[in-house]
Amino acid sequence: MTNETEIYWCRKCEVETLTANPICSKCGKKMQTQSTVKGLGKFLIAIGAILMLISGLGIALTIRQMFFAKFVMAFLALPMWGATASAGIAYIVGGLRQSKTGRTSKLLSWLYFGLMFLIIFFVGLFSVVKG
């Protein structure tokens, strides 16, 4: 349900308007309401919390393997879990900003992409070296 007094925001050119117009007058892209962007921010916070939980468990299990099982390859897993924790922190910070302001950040979007690339890279490196 749309509200006429709700602020509409363009992700591409960052134009704001109070008019219930789904198309940006400057660039022609579809505009989003701030409440939609804030809801997506809460979703980012949840994803970040899940990534932090997974990375915490992964770090704990990796350290356990390093000390008790003398598993040398576990050292390669630590950067992967570090990248996962970094992505979780970035998602939480970005989600908090987004849910507070109702705006997204292109810089944070690229940061998310980069951190996820690092995670995929380290997982691939770990599987190649281990296998």
Image: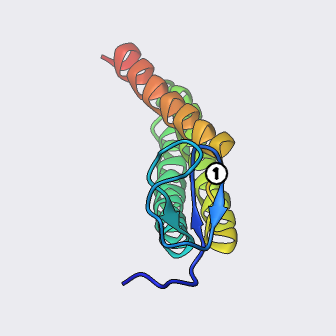
Residue 126 vs 14, above or below: the answer is above
Residue 81 picture location, percent across and down: 54, 41
Residue 10 vs 4, above or below: the answer is above
Residue 113 vs 124, above or below: the answer is below
Residue at disc 1, secondary structure: helix
Residue 70 seen in render: no
72 or 76, nearer to the observer: 76
Q: Look at label 1 and name its amino acid.
A: Ala
Q: Is residue 59 left or right of residue 54?
A: right
Could you tell me which residue is drawn at 57 percent across and 54 percent down? 10
* Circle 1 Cα neighbour tier, 10 Å, few/some/many (<14 / 14–19 / ≥20): many
55 or 106, nearer to the observer: 106
Q: In the rendered image, which residue does mark 1 sit on?
A: 90
Residue 5 picture location, percent across and down: 58, 84
Query: How many labels, in total?
Result: 1
Could you tell me which residue is drawn at 57 percent across and 36 percent down? 115
Residue 127 picture location, percent across and down: 35, 22
Structure colour scheme: rainbow
Residue 113 picture location, percent across and down: 52, 36
82 or 94, nearer to the observer: 94
Residue at far left of view: 131
Residue 21 seen in render: yes
